[in-house]
Image: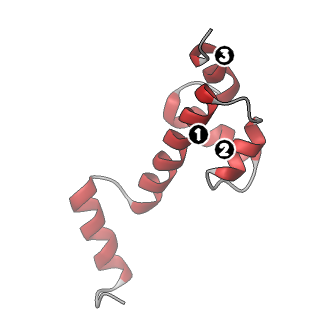
Amino acid sequence: MVGISNSQFDRLFRKLFGSTLRRYLLLTRVHAARRLLSQTDRGITDIALSVGFCDHAHFTRTFSMFMGIAPFAYRKQHRPG
């Protein structure tokens, strides 16, 4: 659509954002999940699906990789009150 190949797009994206598109999208999803975990009572699976993960397990692994803590533990630490 924009007149460049996938590999050219990947290189340009990495140059501009310092990250691959896949990693950027995962991090964006994790940040959205952080907000939902700390501000709502929604279930973790529901949050995972709503931010674009296919299942609870993939979400938990990815969240833990980026945040260094599991989603349940993050919620426990960051819930007000």
The residue located at (47%, 46%) in the rendering is: 27
Q: Which mark is residue 59?
A: 2
Q: Amino acid at mark 1?
A: Ala
The residue located at (59%, 26%) in the rendering is: 38
Assign a secondary structure to mark 1. helix
Depth check, mark 3 against mark 2: the one in front is: 3
Q: Cβ–Cβ below 8 Å for labels 1 and 2? A: yes
Q: Amino acid at mark 2?
A: Phe
The residue located at (54%, 34%) in the rendering is: 35
Figure quadrant of the N terminus: bottom left
Assign a secondary structure to mark 3. helix
Q: Is residue 37 left or right of residue 49?
A: left
Q: Which mark is residue 76?
A: 3
Q: How many marks?
A: 3
Q: Cβ–Cβ below 8 Å for labels 3 and 2? A: no
Q: Residues within 10 Å of mark 2 (few under 14, many from 20)?
A: many
Question: Marks 3 and 1, Cα distance to the nearest angstrom?
Answer: 14 Å
Q: Is residue 48 above or below residue 12?
A: above
Q: Is residue 30 left or right of residue 44?
A: left
| Residue 2 on image: x %, y % | 31, 87
Q: Is residue 34 above or below residue 4?
A: above
Q: Which mark is residue 33?
A: 1
Depth check, mark 1 against mark 2: the one in front is: 1
Colouring method of the image: secondary structure
Assign a secondary structure to mark 2. helix
Among the 4 quarters of the image, the one containing residue 65: top right
Q: Is residue 3 above or below residue 18?
A: below
| Residue 42 on image: x %, y % | 74, 35
